[in-house]
Amino acid sequence: MKVIQMELGNFATNTYIIYDENLDAVIIDPAAEAKKIISTIEKNNLKPKFVLLTHGHPDHVGALYELKEKYNLKVYINEKDQEMLETNSTYFGPMLGLDIKDVKGDSYLKDGQELSLGNLKFKIIETPGHTKGGVCILIENILFSGDTLFLGSMGRTDFPGGNEEEIFSSLKKLMELPDETVVLPGHGPKTTIGYERKYNPYVRMANNY
């Protein structure tokens, strides 16, 4: 397994392209700048198969429409964020100053679900709090945490659909993973579960909530 990380758009959102030895690829959170993503895909001779969305906020899906159209990709999202994905152009997009096209998800992600790409297994962990339908994606010992868990921080809960009690519960759920689990978040640098368990003040708050 190889992972390409791209920091894209006005909100410096992390987009991830995961691919196997056959160059079959999955895209997590195609944030913005579709041309850059397409260029990276073609430069590496990758064959995108589907898209996984950690949540539906527009700064994580700004390139989704173009990629879905170009590669005829199946889009996976949690059902509770589906409405957001379909209305970003008139609601969250303008709120964040983003010009974005609405997209309809093709299939819903559920807690404990596993998707496959060759020998790779993508395990879905529902982690509401930043949004109602937030999820994290676990592949081997790597957690793609979206906007639930960051280095030393957590996702904000003051947007519509956010909930502090839920995100604290989600953080506690993630802390059940092994210390050596690598965390690749939706914004900022990578970290590990062990580091966050020890140093993240929001994890401590969650444990005392």
Image (cartoon, rainbow, N blue to C red):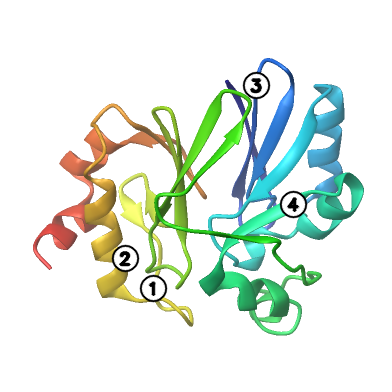
Closer to the chain start, of discs 4 and 1, is 4
Closer to the chain start, of discs 2 and 4, is 4
Locate residue 107 relative to residue 203 in the image: left or right: right
Question: Mark 1 highlights which residue?
Answer: 157
Q: CA distance from mark 3 to mark 2?
A: 32 Å
Q: Position of residue 144 (x, y in %)?
A: 47, 42
Pointer 3: residues within 10 angstroms few (<14), some, or many (20+)? some
Q: Which mark is residue 20?
A: 3
Question: Mark 4 highlights which residue?
Answer: 74
Q: CA distance from mark 3 to mark 1?
A: 35 Å
Pointer 1: residues within 10 angstroms few (<14), some, or many (20+)? some
Label 2 is placed on what type of residue?
A: Ile
Q: Position of residue 154 (x, y in %)?
A: 35, 57
Residue at 73% across, 70% down:
98
Name the image quarter holding residue 202.
bottom left
Question: Mark 2 highlights which residue?
Answer: 167
In front of the other: 170 or 8: 170
